[in-house]
Amino acid sequence: MQASDSTFPLRSRVAIVTGATAGIGEATVRELVRLGAYCVINGRRREKLLELVRECGEGNVAAVVGDCADDSVVTRLFDVARYSLGDPRHEACIVIANAGRGLSGSVLTSDPSQWEEMIRTNLLACAKLIREAGKRFLSEQEGKAIPNLLDRPRDILVMGSTVGRHISPFSSMYGSTKFAANSLAEAARRELGPKGIRVSLIEPGFVESEFQGVAGYDPKWFEEVKTRIGPVLQPPDIARLVTTIVSQPAHVHMSDVLIRPTRQEYP
């Protein structure tokens, strides 16, 4: 007996996920595959990607190792996705700009030697992925009548942050990159939405993952935060939101979702 589409609502959809070696990206890949999608995943840590491929199955996931701000890596992600199901008609139709890194401190107190790398990952990589996805999605539409634009969903998701909306002095350099990513997402939504392409922004509050360690947050401080506002979000909480967004009918667009732990009052 064949499983119904309600069991696998994302069957025959192909997703690209950057930053898939840990945290939100890794959890999102698992959830997409569980719901039937094929995933092309990206990150810099080869072994972590291959572990995820083995876990989810080579028939469900392919890995592209490298820096997602590198033009050649971006191109390869889409090229691998195009032939992932053995049929060039199955272009990537879900693109998730998730790769990112944090940085503890303000413009006065953060480590300036890390600024350029953070901007490259959080902003330039995001912009390049939006650009390539938008161009490829638009090329699919050439020659089609307007009523046919919504024949199937096409999604670009940008992973923002609450500090990209609400200014936070303790992480203002990181927050500035997320303000920029938020702006890119909304501008792309206004440009691409009328052409049948959904661009969604997800703005998480505190999510417990590798993020805090990479960003250089004081572990004692984060434990105090968790005690005060916890339970904090976990990566699967965001993954469920991602799949909820992309599972909507093509004419329904959840364009901007801010998600926090229930007890987080700010930011």
Image: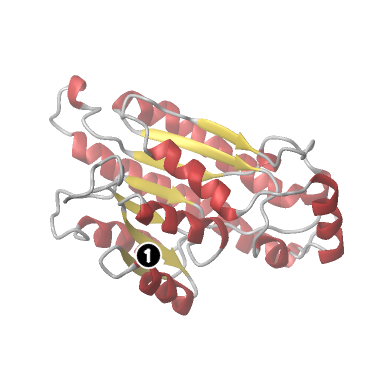
Q: Which x, y percent locates residue 171? A: 77, 50
* Near-viewer residue (193 or 59): 59
Image position of 69 with respect to 243: above or below: below
**In this rendering, does residue 107 appear at all?**
no
**Residue underneath mark 1:** 73
Q: Is residue 189 visible?
A: yes
Q: Which residue is rendered at x = 49% and y = 45% of the image?
A: 240
Say above or below: 150 vs 50.
above
Is residue 90 left or right of 57 when viewed as pictured?
left
How many numbered circles does the render carry? 1
Up-down: is 205 above or below 87?
A: above
Pick out the residue farthest to the top: 147
Q: Is residue 252 above or below residue 206?
A: above
- Residue in the image at 14% along x and 53% along y: 88
Question: Residue 196's x, y, as percent?
Answer: 30, 28
- Left or right of residue 143: residue 191: right
Relative horizontal placement of residue 211, taking residue 32 as reference (left or right) = right
On the image, the x and y values in percent for residue 109 come to 85, 57
- Along the viewing direction, whichever of 140 and 229 lies nearer the viewer: 229
Q: How is the image coloured?
A: secondary structure
Amino acid carrying label 1: it is Val
